[in-house]
Image: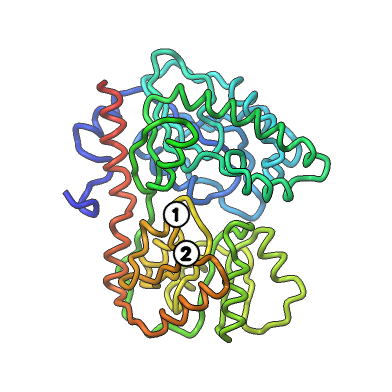
Amino acid sequence: MRATDASPGGTSEAAERLRRCSAVLTHHWLVRRRGGERVLEALAELLPGAPVYTLVHRSRPGQPPARLDGHAVLASPLSWLPGAGRWYPALLPLMPLAARLMCLPPVDLVVCSDAAIAKAMRVDRRSRLVCYCHSPMRYVWEPHIAEQYAQTLPALLRPTWRAVCARVRRADYDAAQRVDCFVANSRTVARRIERFYGRPSEVVHPPVDIPPPPPANRRENFYLCVGRHVAYKRLDLAVEACEQLGCRLVVIGDGPDAVRLARGRKSGAVTFLGYQSDEVIRQHYAPARALLFPGEEDFGIVPVEALAHGCPAIAYGVGGAAETVADGRTGVLFDAQTVAGLATAITRFEGLTFDAAVLHEHARGFSRERFQYEMAAILSRVLSQ
């Protein structure tokens, strides 16, 4: 069966087994609706009525919460702290303890959607624990990213950061050993799970909402960047490459790098729109010449969303983008994560043509239906073991 032919909920046998079982869902934190929360929503559809346990549940003002209608959400005491929805990264030293204080009910199945330490919540002996891992915490496990992350913390916390990392790594590793089955969102993350936790995993790419086939409209003369812009996503490369080439660039999304790069910039070539709704993002995918994606992502839903709208992607060919963008067919991949490397890729892109229908069909391989089909099969198998 092709992934795009899969029915929601997987096979009838797997779906029926999931409907009969008792289950809970866990998630690292619920403060905004991003890729991880969309995964949680798709998992929640497989397990109707299952309660959701999370470390912080405090939606940020002006941003939509995760769509979990019919699912009770239970949060740790960290949510009671003032400003928890805004300053949750600074709560990392408390998260291992907060997770261990959350005792989950005795159910058949615990499905953990995790990019932090939700897997450390206490699971009953009778429960099977499946962890869909968006990635082990790179800001804890990888020294160069840990140093970058430390600079974003309040000044009072920076001197203790190395000790915090060591303690969180130990708690994270111990929690990973209690997982019955790991599912990684990409081959890149599967390698990290093996390297950091010493555990094997299966790969199921996360779900992307696929729109109807796009019209073959003439694309406009601007490039696009979308996301929450933090240092490792390398928005600076896109801005500098476009200014160097004299190309128009539209930047959608908030984050410290968007604020830093927009401050005092006089170039008319780059427009910063800040946070925008999904509808506005779709309206920009449709006419954009191409998406620029210069960072290394665990998976990266944004390039697939762009392809689904008939927008090619120019992406750094490391990490998840190497699994979603077909060089020369649905976009261009580049090897050197530098301004020159991206500028060369843009110049190469200008000499190629892309078919919107081909891009849309490629994106269908990452649909929500395909994700639910593959996850239902795994969860059903774990239950039957």
For this rendering, which residue is in front, 83 or 159?
A: 159
* Residue 205, above or below 272: above
Q: Residue 307: image x %, image y %?
A: 37, 67
For this rendering, which residue is in front, 377 or 316?
A: 316
In the image, what residue type sits under mark 2? Tyr
Q: Residue at x 43, y 25 (%)?
A: 179
Q: Residue 59: image x %, image y %?
A: 62, 45
Label 1 element class: loop
Q: Residues within 10 Å of mark 1 (few under 14, many from 20)?
A: some
Q: Residue pushed farthest left?
A: 1
Tell me where residue 305 sits by quadrant. bottom left
Q: Residues within 10 Å of mark 2 (few under 14, many from 20)?
A: many
Marks 2/1: CA–CA distance: 8 Å
Residue holding disc 1: 319
In the image, 185: left or right of 94? left
User: Which quadrant: the C terminus?
Assistant: top left
Q: Which mark is residue 316?
A: 2
In the image, what residue type sits under mark 1? Gly
State if disc 1 and disc 2 touch (CB < 8 Å). yes
Q: Residue at x 57, y 73 (%)?
A: 339
In the image, 120: left or right of 368? right
Mark yes or no: residue 321 visible: yes
